[in-house]
């Protein structure tokens, strides 16, 4: 009997809902495509709680330091590491700026960078820049029959001409890859319902406060005035009266001019409401903060809370941010570093890789006690190698204040 051949071909598909380059996997139409990206930007830029969450995430991650670590047991490992370090430090836009743009994937679910190279005087191919491509300029995706993203069309300001950029030329960061969705999933997605409800309640509350302060306007018609008359003058007066009581405001330019016979009164309000909108809004604020493990930003705003609770919450938050920093480093090493060395004819050996300092911060006293006790002659559990010394100097930021810098 002939041997049965194993089928190496790909049969199934990811199941991502898409059509003509547009993604429809999100079941809420208001959060799809360009409309969804505008909504997420409004959430980040207009809401105080979501804005503070984004600020906390950004600033903590930006506080980390990035470096290059050579491959172990490889000839010319230090030379390769120095080459990668030269690229990382010599780009037109420094890594600190690029990293800030990378973190925009928390808002939109993904971030894209076009890798631009140049050839230096030694004929080496180097990174010129990792050029950020705004999420809101994205037109549609180019996805093959098996659900793999092979490129995208961009329509950027100010001329809004359409460009096609292959994904092989890009760095593609995304929060999630479920269904191989190139748009990922915004970190604010689970906050949307709470944000939407809070936004509407705040608008109603603002209107209620204004009416409480200014009073409820009431217009009285002149004696014998017939509002059902079809005369143009009568209808014009009714339209003018409706506009007046709708748009009346108390400010430095307040004043009213009424036709003869018309009267305006401001009905006073008792100033009390059956529903405490403050507690409702606070409830939605807590729900939004909880979606990113950032409940600690609410501590101090209320009478309850403790140091132990804050420490526990921030520990989980830092743990999540550590995972995100690891992911950014992984994408850089797999997509950017591998391509850089391949273009320079190096592809058959372990390569240096980009690393970051720990996100979670310990006090220098804790670190000193830890190292001192483990390296004690009686215990001998830790040998102070050059790598450990370099880590301790980097962690304590001693290199940044060294002589000559």
Image: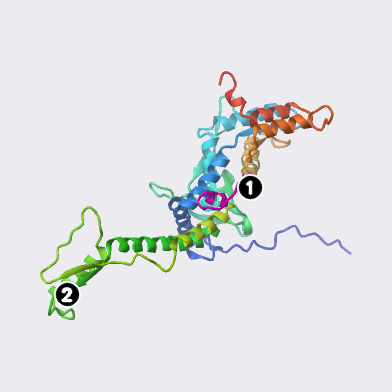
**Magenta segment, principal secondary structure?**
helix
Q: For mark 2, give the secondary structure.
A: loop
Is the residue marked by circle 1 packed among few (<14), some (14-19), or many (20+) residues within 10 Å?
few
Q: Is residue 240 above or below residue 103?
A: below
Give x and y (percent) for residue 235.
Answer: 17, 74
Q: Residue 95, located in which quarter of the rendered image?
A: top right
Q: Give residue 221's position: percent from left, percent from top.
A: 17, 74
Q: Residues within 10 Å of mark 2 (few under 14, many from 20)?
A: some
Q: Give the tally of numbered discs.
A: 2
Q: Nearer the viewer, residue 220 or 167?
A: 220
User: Horizontal and vertical percent for residue 76?
Assistant: 72, 27
Q: Earlier in the sequence, mark 2 or mark 1?
A: 2
**Which residue was labeled with disc 1?**
308
Look at the image and tell me in which quarter the N terminus lies.
Answer: bottom right
Identify the element where label 1 is drawn. Answer: helix
Horizontal arrangement in the rendering, residue 85 relative to residue 381 (left or right): left
Q: Is residue 184 above or below residue 61?
A: below
Alpha-carbon span between mark 2 and mark 1: 65 Å
Q: Is residue 76 visible?
A: no
């Amino acid at each position: 009997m002939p041997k049965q051949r194993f089928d190496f071909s790909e049969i199934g598909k990811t199941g991502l809902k898409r059509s003509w380059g547009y993604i429809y996997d999100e079941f809420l139409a208001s959060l799809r495509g360009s409309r969804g990206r505008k909504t997420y930007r409004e959430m980040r830029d207009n809401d105080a709680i979501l804005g503070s969450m984004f600020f906390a995430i950004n600033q903590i991650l930006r506080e980390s330091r990035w470096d290059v670590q050579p491959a172990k047991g490889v000839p010319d490992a230090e030379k390769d590491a120095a080459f990668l370090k030269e690229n990382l430090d010599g780009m037109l836009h420094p890594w600190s700026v690029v990293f800030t743009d990378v973190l925009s994937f928390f808002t939109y679910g993904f971030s894209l960078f076009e890798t631009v190279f140049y050839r230096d005087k030694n004929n080496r191919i180097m990174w010129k820049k990792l050029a950020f491509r705004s999420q809101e300029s994205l037109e549609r995706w180019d996805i093959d029959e098996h659900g793999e993203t092979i490129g995208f069309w961009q329509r950027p300001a100010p001329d809004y001409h359409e460009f096609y950029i292959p994904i092989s030329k890009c760095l593609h960061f995304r929060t999630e890859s479920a269904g191989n969705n190139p748009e990922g999933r915004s970190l604010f997605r689970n906050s949307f319902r709470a944000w939407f409800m809070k936004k509407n309640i705040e608008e109603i509350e603002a209107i209620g406060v204004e009416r409480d302060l200014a009073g409820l306007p009431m217009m009285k018609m002149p004696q014998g005035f017939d509002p059902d008359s079809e005369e143009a003058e009568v209808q014009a007066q009714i339209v003018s009266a409706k506009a007046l009581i709708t748009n009346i405001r108390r400010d430095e330019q307040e004043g009213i001019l009424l036709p003869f016979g018309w009267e305006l009164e401001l009905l006073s309000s008792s100033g009390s409401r059956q529903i405490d909108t403050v507690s409702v809004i606070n409830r939605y604020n807590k729900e939004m903060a909880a979606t990113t493990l950032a409940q600690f930003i609410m501590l101090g705003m209320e009478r309850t809370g403790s140091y132990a609770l804050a420490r526990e919450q921030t520990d989980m938050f830092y743990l999540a941010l550590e995972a995100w920093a690891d992911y950014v480093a992984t994408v850089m090493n797999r997509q950017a570093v591998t391509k850089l060395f391949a273009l320079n004819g190096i592809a058959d050996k372990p390569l240096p890789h980009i690393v970051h300092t720990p996100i979670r911060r310990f006090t220098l006293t804790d670190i000193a006690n830890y190292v001192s006790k483990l390296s004690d002659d009686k215990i001998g559990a830790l040998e102070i190698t050059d790598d450990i010394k370099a880590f301790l100097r980097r962690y304590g930021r001693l290199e940044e204040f060294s002589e000559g810098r």
